[in-house]
Amino acid sequence: MSKVALAQIESSTNKEENLRSAVSIIEQAGRRGAELITFPEFLMAFSPASQTPEELSKIAEAVDGRFISTLCEAASRNRVAVLATIYETSATPNRCSTRQSGSMHSGMSP
């Protein structure tokens, strides 16, 4: 039977703060023997209703960007697969895509 961790995190608009929290939670899940951890929406950054698409696009990054790379490294170090929603850069100016990325460990691609 697989052990799954469900992360409850109150994301802020500060992407770096959210990343630090996520890495800490991944480490904790790994210590407790979880094989998979799932994060709620807005892990990368909380997006208030007042936020414009242009503002949100400034938070977005490529799948191989720092946010995802750091999550992948933490997942690999702790042998925990991660399911998280990110804001991905888009070919359309001032827009982003929302993607759920999973299986971020042991050298697997998001």
Image (cartoon, grey):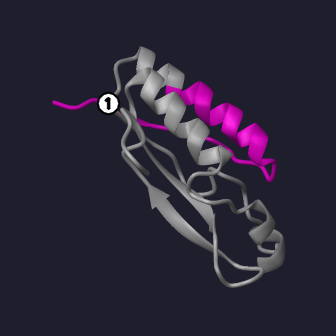
Residue drawn at x 62%, y 50% is 43
- Closer to us: 48 or 60: 60
Q: Residue at x 82, y 72 (%)?
A: 51
Q: Position of residue 68 (x, y in %)?
A: 58, 47
The residue under label 1 is 35
- Could you tell me residue 102's position as x and y percent? 40, 50
Write down the quadrant of residue 21 in the picture.
Answer: top right
Give the residue at x 34% y 19%. 33
Q: Quadrant of residue 86?
A: bottom right
The crowd level at tag 1 (other Cα within 10 Å; few <14, some 14-19, many 20+) is some
In the image, 81 versus 108, the foreground residue is 108
| Quadrant position of the N terminus in the picture | top left
Q: Residue at x 51, y 46 (%)?
A: 39
SS at badge 1:
loop
**Residues rendered magenta in the picture:** 1-26
**Measured along the vertical axis of the image, is residue 54 above or below residue 16?**
below
Query: Does the magenta run of residues contain 10?
Result: yes
Q: Is residue 49 something that shows in the picture? A: yes
Residue 6: % across, % down: 44, 39
Q: Is residue 82 magenta?
A: no
